[in-house]
Amino acid sequence: MVRSAFRELLLAPLTEHKGRLALSVGAIALGVALGYSVQLVNGAAITEFTQAVHTLAGDADLHIRGAAAGPGGGFDETLYARAARMPEVAVASPVVEIEAKVPGRRDPLRVLGVDVFRAARIQPLAFGGEVEDRLDWLRPDRAFLSAQAADALGLGAGDTLAIQVGLGTATFRVAGVLPAGAIPGRVAVMDIAAAQATFGRTGRLDRVDLRLRPGASAEQLAARLRAEVPAGVVVEHADADAERGASLSRSYRVNLNVLSLVALFTGGLLVFSTQALAVVRRRAQLALLRVLGVTRGGMLALLLAEAAVIGAAGAAAGIVLGQLLAEGVLRYFGAELGAGYFRGLRPAVSFEPAAMAGFFLLGLATALVGSLAPALEAARASPAAALKAGDEQRAFAPLQPAWPGIALLAIGAALTQAGPVRGLPITGYVAIALLLVGTILLMPRIALVVFRRLPGFRVPAAGLAFAQLRGAPGQVGVSLAAIVAGVSLMVSMAIMIASFRQSLDDWLERVLPADLYVRAGFGGESAFLSPSDQRALAAVPGVRRVELQRNRRLILAPARPPVVLLARPVEHEGRLPPLVGPAHERGADDPPAAWPSEIAADLYGWRPGQVIELPIAVADKAPKPVHVGPHGLPAFVVAGVWRDYARQQGAVLIERDVYVALTRDANANEAALWLKPGASLDDVERAIAGIPGGANLELARPGELRDVSLRIFDRTFAVTYALEAAAVIIGLLGLSSSFGSLVLARRREFGMLRHVGMTRAQIGAMLAIEGAVVSALGLAAGLALGWVVSLVLIHVVNRQSFHWSMDMHLPWSSLAAFVLAMLVLATMTALLAGRRAMSRDAVLAVKEDW
């Protein structure tokens, strides 16, 4: 009997107002679905990437890897012979690894040159399978393709694979397609001698994989090798590649997870406002239950049980929706989520019980926390006072003090000055949350101050509307919780994205001063401009000046992604990069200059005036550098730090003549062309296509590069827009639910007003005015808070996550359109919410007071 009564008390209030119940459940479901789906997609991408790295690593315990940029790349192959003879080493497998360009294709093809007999002992899954003719592994004109590469290139056994080398083309017969999963990614495998001869790596290796004998210590051998290998060579564990790949995308993944939880946070505020106003509306009913013998503990348990039902239903629905959403994203958009970190991977969503349980509990906890304050107030209320009419405002009394909100705002402001935690802006996230909660706690006080200053009106509808707002600031503050959170977060992200986009546009204007840009290949190491190609390019009719750039990769720390070394004319041509902060004036005894990007400077703690070492391998016949660091590497002085939005892993810029003098590498990857006055771009482009190998060059005008960059930017932030839009929708639904609860709580008031002569139209006008004024207050607070949060996003979260700086730009037109649309929608929401209450008979509405 007791259980049946408790069940009736629990379910009856929930089913009485199915619309608000659906809104609360839907808000929790949407928040859980977004968070769970992002977690599934990110987890699937990282798992697939890690498995790919482990498949290629096979049974290797250690890698010896070339980290320096220099002649031929990699390191001398005599190091392989020394490592293979060490007593701790069971198998040593040499590897040549090239990011090659396939003519007509944008994405590079990874080429592995291996000694198949040794590679098969370390990676049996990749190289130990049966092939039609095993001698094809040794033939110099043969190559095997991974299943993904064959599918992407549309090639099969017996077809011809073309790879760009310089501006020429090397062709190979596809000897076979490896089984799916044998080698992940777009990979071609050939004999190591053929790879060395084709790509100019004779006598050079990029990597040596080591499998140790049983009982040998990988740590001890790694320490011994690090003491013996030359400068610019690193010794690392087999999982270092996985760590580098995961660390490159970690900040982006964490930010997506946080953004996805914003919708859940806003949903929790919706539950709070809905439950708070529902408890006020049922205040007399709950007091009657107390009179009939329900204890405070029982009342608290009853109200929290209602919240638990809402949270459990929303979380369960969110889990199902999130699973479907993740599968759809991976099927139609892939795992990159717009940023390109996992392009080329084809992961599948897997069942993750821990993540499922975690997000279910998170949705449940959100509903419980959102309902805790209203439940505690209802349990503590005096039954005698609560049974009297007009006691509703006493429920909002705990919200009147301003000090809790002010304290949270002060703590949040202080946390913005803290540094990152393990490379992530944890304190920045906490600061934003405290600023949000602090502002929401201050909304009743803000509403009281604002509404008391409003003038009086003789028009009955307006006068009554303002009188109601002055007398019930607590209700207004509660009803605005979700909308203030949603609007402020949307505004802050809009300001941050607009600032980023405008800063990117301004940056592109500065770094693209030439008339035409020529590139041998995108992201590939096999394509380059040789000295003869450079001379042919400079001799094209109409070309006044050619500026060449060499791009190489440097591994500066084993656990971090490689940075990009850029070698081009800088000071001699007056082409200083866009510096941020002060520049260092070099002295006569200073080493050559280097300009690291903001990302590289932050990651490695470089500052102007500091002397640093760069792993640039010095050629045998090159003069020894005058300045050498303590590790035997060429030394440079940081002449300034520059803004670079193109290379997310960081970059270091040096003078090209310094690079050529050290390495004797006179090749280039890119060229910027300035034309003679009156020269036609179309004529120059046709002439470039006619030089030997010109058909393999990629040509782009500054406007085209700018448009492509901005399209990539918009695609990257498409997910962010969607997540923030979800938070605003939840906030708008919260305002609708809040107004609906307020209108129902005031049905006796409306009945009395009808009895004294007010028409339905006048009551509707009163509600519309209330909705417009309350919405305007919420939008104003959301705009102000959004601007403050945008400062935290720009100068704290973004800076600590991605190490990019940007200039503040306010999108006035977009914000004005957004505010106007929200004001209209919120006003209509308030008006529509009152239609149900106004439709009741006036006598029935006031019957409870007889």
Image: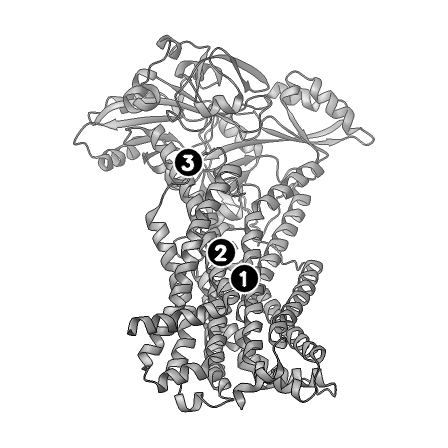
Whole-percent x, y for residue 639 in the image: 55, 46
Q: Quadrant of residue 126?
A: top left
Measuring from the top left, give residue 407's x and y in whole percent.
46, 76
The amino acid type of the residue labelled 3 equals Leu
Q: Identify which residue, 96 or 735, lies in the foreground.
A: 735
Q: Which mark is residue 30?
A: 2
Q: Which residue is mark 1?
A: 730
Question: Does residue 137 appear left or right of residue 481 in this picture?
Answer: left
SS for callout 2: helix
In front of the other: label 3 or label 1? Answer: 1
Position of residue 748 relative to residue 111, above or below, is: below
Mark 1: amino acid: Ile
**Dots 1 and 2: beta carbons under 8 Å?**
yes
The answer to whether 719 is drawn above or below residue 660 in the figure is below
Residue name at image x 64 percent, y 74 percent: 771
Rendering quarter of residue 508: top right
Q: Is residue 465 left or right of residue 3?
A: right
> Disc number at residue 633?
3
Dots 3 and 1: beta carbons under 8 Å? no
Specify the amino acid type for callout 2: Leu
- What is the secondary structure assignment of the residue under circle 3? loop
Find the distance from the CA under tag 3 to the CA under tag 1: 57 Å
What residue appears at the point 38 percent right and 71 percent down from the top-left corner? 8
Task: State how far apart marks 1 and 2 are (Cα).
Answer: 9 Å
Rate crowding at label 3 as few (under 14), some (14 to 19) or many (20 or more) other CA atoms within 10 Å.
Answer: many
Q: Earlier in the sequence, mark 2 or mark 3?
A: 2
